[in-house]
Image: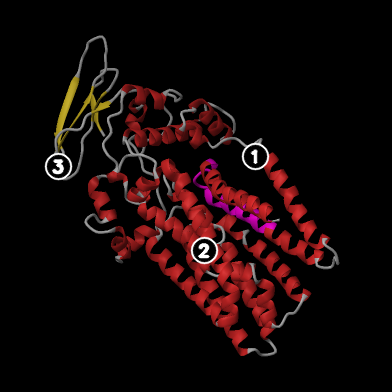
Amino acid sequence: MVLGRVISGCGVGLLSTIVPIYQSEISPPNHRGALACAEFTGNIFGYAFSVWTDYFCSFIDSDLAWRIPLFIQCVIGAFLAAGTLIMPESPRWLIDTDKDDEGLRILADLHGGDLDDPIAKAEYREIKDKVIMERESGEGRSYAMMWQRYKQRVLLAMSSQAFAQLNGINVISYYAPKVFEEAGWLGRQAILMTGINAIIYLLSTLPPWYLVDRWGRRPILLSGAIVMAVALCFTGYFIYLDRPYTPNAVVVCVIVFNAAFGYSWGPIPWLYPPEIMPLSVRAKGVSISTATNWAFNTLVGEITPYLQEVIQWRLYFMHGFFCLCSFILVYFLYPETKGVPLEEMDAVFGETDKLPSIALSSAAANERTSFLPESGSAYPPKPHSRASSRNNSGSGQGWLSRLFRRNDESRKDVGSEYEPLHVDEEHEEDAYADDMSLRRMDEGRTRFKVAEDDDDNDDREEDEDDVGGLRWLAVRISDGAGIWDW
């Protein structure tokens, strides 16, 4: 039994790490949230199914009362294992490991199966550019590098999973029968109330399918935290009063709490970490956030029985306080990620100006365009200027102090909807036909030289001062038409 639990725990840990990554990497930006919430609904369906299985098995007076639930878990696990055999690999992982043909094919399949689909090719180009940029930067992929460069994102990912547990869900999920017994429901009635609560919990996960990609992540988390805090405080208050109406009042409060959690802090913390972590360290970042979830899950699960005996009804006020803390954390620190492509998440965190200037070799330039048409895409996006990045990121201050600084402009920026970056369409067709070689010069001055062999051996160079952080890129058009500035 113990060995089986260990093996099962390892499987659950792996799945809870890989599934959010896989889901986010195959989903389009405008439906990524809805698909993640649909996956969470499947999770809660399993929870509700287990509760009702336990309820019906409680009528069995033999060891089948616990053997049947365990056997059902084995059957479901076998179906899951069989399903993975027909699932495609993540296209981002394939492109990151230089399996470009297969990656492009899967992207095309995700967009209808046409290899010439312009959306699929634009997405391939975006992913490939990001991979090349990260490789040319010379950065490693260690945990130390991730912590050094992406500390803000790692802490946000960890905090989302930590508060998903500290907000009190496992006090209700794990110990719901005991909570209802505290309120006056006894024996099998407590299990029945847990089953009814599980159905409400399941239904509450459906609205985010529609809302998460329309409202955004922040409004859902903020509203859910407030409703959960109120419901938990009233739960503790009614248990403290211990009046004839306490059992019914506690059932209502617990159902409201579970519904609020199922629509907000249930699905979003599984969606948010893989969204905000870059491709190079996405698996590592999500693994840390998932480990944080299970660590706090264990903490809450272990101390709840003790706290129910020692502080009793005050336990619910304690978790209500954590709900308010999560509200403050989201309000000040969490940027909105609704509709943002994964490869453009650096712009959300104001980190585009931190990327080093990279000299792309001819091989790298050919590598990223080998599968692409000569035109038909609005990618790549134009980088933020240094001036705008300074305004957004507040250079000279730590990220924590920047995000806590409140003014009308910053609050408007955090709450506003992300808009994709644009590029001059007049030159986008020529941009990917060029073979460019970028050279960095001395501090305060940048020279970019684009050389290309042609019949006339006509080489042109353009030097411009980098004044106030603005860099000019002189590109020689392959057909000899001249030079355009980006």
Mark 1 is surrounded, within 10 Å at the Cα level, by few (under 14), some (14 to 19) or many (20 or more) other residues, namely: few
Q: Could you tell me which secondary element the residue under label 2 belongs to?
A: helix
Marks 1 and 2, the one that precedes in the sequence: 1
Mark 3 is surrounded, within 10 Å at the Cα level, by few (under 14), some (14 to 19) or many (20 or more) other residues, namely: few
In the foreground, 111 or 405: 405
Of tags 3 and 1, which is closer to the observer?
1
Q: Is residue 129 above or below residue 415?
A: above
Of tags 3 and 2, which is closer to the observer?
2
Q: Are marks 3 and 2 in contact (CB under 8 Å)?
A: no
Instruction: Give the left or right position of residue 144, taking residue 54 as reference.
Output: left
Q: In this figure, which residue is indicated by the disc labeled 1?
A: 84
Q: Main secondary structure of the magenta part?
A: helix
What residue appears at the point 27 percent right and 12 percent down from the top-left corner? 454
Residue 331 x, y percent position in the rendering = 41, 65
Of tags 1 and 2, which is closer to the observer?
2
Q: In this figure, which residue is indicated by the disc labeled 2?
A: 296
